[in-house]
Image (cartoon, rainbow, N blue to C red):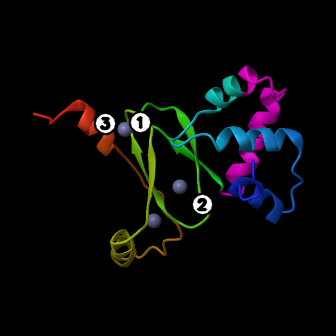
Amino acid sequence: MTSSDPIVEALGAAGYRLTGPRRAVAGLIAEYDGHFTAAELEIAARERRLGVSRATLFRALELLTELHVVERLDLPSGEHAYVPCVREHHHHLVCSRCGRVADVEDGALADAVAEIARRSGYRIESHRLELFGLCRHCQAKAGPSA
Ligand SMILES: [Zn+2]
Ligand SMILES: [Zn+2]
Ligand SMILES: [Zn+2]
């Protein structure tokens, strides 16, 4: 693992010590390309005999979520998953088949939010949006849909 790991950097920037378990959890997360669940992380930690307890794992995940390097996703299945993330405001495109996650910026959505604020009279402070569908890769595998 290198010091350019965004999770390791975020922990340092927020003044957290890079303890063994935190380093282990950061290392596990760095291997995911898409989303992962706490249960998957737990299995991976056990398989590698990292000696990270379930409670430690959950605490580390919670901390990383607070630091916005990991974000919680609510999947259409009702499951909770996590994605490695960046602090800047953005949204996620999530593939419902393979779990690949892509980041998208607000773009025209910012205009839509401004319009909603104008019409409703609310001062909108934040919003969340997650988009689910099939990534290019899974569409290709499924063949042209009828
Ligand atoms: Zn993200
Ligand atoms: Zn996919
Ligand atoms: Zn947005």
What SS does tag 3 mark?
helix
Q: Amino acid at mark 3?
A: Cys
* Residue 22, picture quadrant: top right
* Residue on which disc 2 sits: 86
State yes or no: Cβ of the residue under disc 3 lies below 8 Å from any atom of ligand 2. Answer: yes
Q: Nearer the viewer, residue 16 or 1?
A: 1
Q: In the rendering, at what x and y percent does residue 141 appear?
A: 26, 32
* Residue 48, picture quadrant: top right
Other residues around mark 3 within 10 Å, as few (<14) / some (14–19) / many (≥20): some
Q: Which residues are magenta?
A: 45-68
Pointer 2 or 1: first along the chain: 1
Q: Nearer the viewer, residue 30 or 116?
A: 30
Judge depth for marks 2 and 1 and give the one in front: 2
- Ligand 3 visible in quadrant: bottom left
What SS does tag 1 mark?
loop
Q: Are marks 2 and 1 in contact (CB under 8 Å)?
A: no
Q: Image height check: is 59 above or below 90?
A: above
Label 1 – label 3 distance at C-alpha: 17 Å
Label 2 – label 1 distance at C-alpha: 22 Å
What SS does tag 2 mark?
loop
Pointer 1 or 3: first along the chain: 1
**Is residue 74 found left or right of 37 in the rendered image?**
left
Q: Is residue 97 visible?
A: yes
Q: Is residue 59 magenta?
A: yes
* Residue on which disc 1 sits: 76
State yes or no: Cβ of the residue under disc 2 lies below 8 Å from any atom of ligand 1. Answer: yes
